[in-house]
Amino acid sequence: MLGLKQNEVALLDHQSEWEEKAAEAINKLKEIFGNTALDIQHIGSTAIHNIKAKPMLDIVLGVENFDMLDDILPKLAKNGVYKSSNQPLPGIILCAIKENRESDIVLCNLHIVVIGSEQWNNHIVFRDYMNAFPQKVAIYEKLKIELAEKFSADRKAYCNGKTEFINTCISEARIYADMKRKFDIKVFKPIDKGLSGDKKYYIETASGDRFMLRLSDIIKSDKKKAEFERMKQMSAYGIPMPEPVKFGVCDGGQSVYQLTAWCDGVNLETVLSGFPEAEQYALGIKAGMILNKIHRVPILESDITEEIWETRYSGFIDDSIKSFHDCGVTVDGAGIIIDYFNNNRCLLKSRPQCYLHGDYHMGNMMLYENEIYIIDWEIHLYNCYGDPWLEITMQETPHFSTGLIDGYFGGNIPDEFWRMLAFYSSISAVSSVPWAYYCFPEELDSRKKLCADVLRWYDNMQNIIPSWYIKNYKAGGI
């Protein structure tokens, strides 16, 4: 069966005859358009394997430009091709193939576009992407069935309901098509985690190699290239992390990509609380030793700055304090923390600078076979170059946090460290409030709670050693 009334929505199981009918229609169009048609392809759901579809073909016909159609368009009607009175999208001439002009049964929608245009490419990559990944087809079919039941007599609403899914898939499909030209991809899955705004994918090749693909807007090219070079430096120094493999431009020059080896295991943040306290401490020791090693990685000459840390950090915090006051969020005890910062600025004098991870917490640690691997090497604040003690922070549990400090210093903790920890922990908590308020409102309550926690840990900034630190902890021979 082929043909459907213009505003009707009805889905049929995939029919083998649709390919045959599409081939016939393509041959007929070749006769009509001749050399003006540079390519003609079967698209839409009837061109996707094993999916329910409306019994109506979609065909895209590519031309060099629309001026080439001046002599052809007036002749279409006598061949059963009728230009639609409604042309809803720019860059597309939409026609209907019917038995006759008066018929309200459409056999085929013909999309005439410029060959190689965005419209052409979107149709092709969407079809090929769906056919490459049956799991996507199943999701799409479920959506189509739900919409068809809801809008059986309103095709416009039915089509609008598919738009978000289709646009998302087209975005993924363009990346997939581009990366498939570079790598023999067998598996391609989006990863929906993180706050960076980058697109991330799990990739597996036919040879069994597994990678993480991270895509960023081309305007971030310099920053992402610097990140990649820094990751290479870290990996070469022996930091346990996914190996950086390749950096390049993709998606028609719209994006840059970082390809790294896939990291097996579980995110430490999701499992740590279920471990015995002694094991939490032992993992903290490992995390501290890794962080110490990160801070000893030789610095690339291009990353060295002559500006001293006192100037860099004070400027940022002063701006953050102003933003805190401007945002109007009330935080009990914030004045105590801000006064503590202002009264102890002298601690920043002569502080060393080194490479920082930039976001060193359990959410960026993977646990595999009882070993920790560090992920997410984005360049964040201070260009990830600053005081090494800045990123020693309270983590999820006291035992892990204690282990991190003990592991970092090898058990010999200098007195000066505790002053710096109290200094950084307190003002960082306050400065995170405007960040949450303006950027991630859903995080605001947790940032306010952190301020309260800091005041509790340090007894309203009267003590320099936090209450969560477990002195002289020993367990199970550790």
Image (cartoon, rainbow, N blue to C red):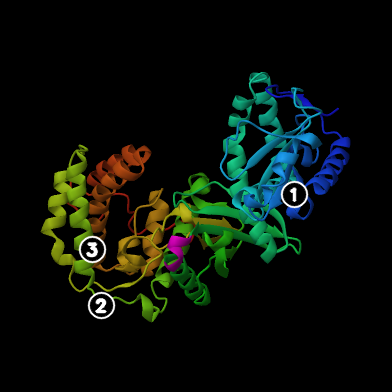
Give, as a three-letter code, the residue at label 2: Glu
Mark 3 vs mark 1, CA separation in Å: 50 Å
Earlier along the polypeptide chain: callout 3 or callout 2?
2
Q: Which residue is mark 3?
A: 313
Residue in front for this viewpoint, 432 or 201: 201
Give, as a three-letter code, the residue at label 3: Tyr
Position of residue 372 measured from the top left corner of the image (x, y, whole percent): 53, 61
Image quadrant in which you'd find residue 143: top right
Earlier along the polypeptide chain: callout 2 or callout 1?
1
Q: Is residue 112 above or below residue 86?
A: below
Q: Which residue: 76% across, 64% down?
A: 207
> What stretch of residues is rendered in magenta?
218-222
Earlier along the polypeptide chain: callout 3 or callout 1?
1
Residue in front for this viewpoint, 262 or 110: 110
Could you say whether the residue bearing mark 1 is in a helix, strand or loop? helix
Residue in front for this viewpoint, 30 or 383: 30
Q: Which residue is mark 2?
A: 306
- Decide: few, some or many residues near mark 1? Use Cα within 10 Å; few <14, some 14-19, many ≥20: some
Q: In the image, which is nearer the foreground, mark 3 or mark 1?
A: 1
Could you say whether the residue bearing mark 2 is in a helix, strand or loop? loop
Magenta-colored stretch includes residue 465: no
Position of residue 452 measured from the top left corner of the image (x, y, whole percent): 25, 41
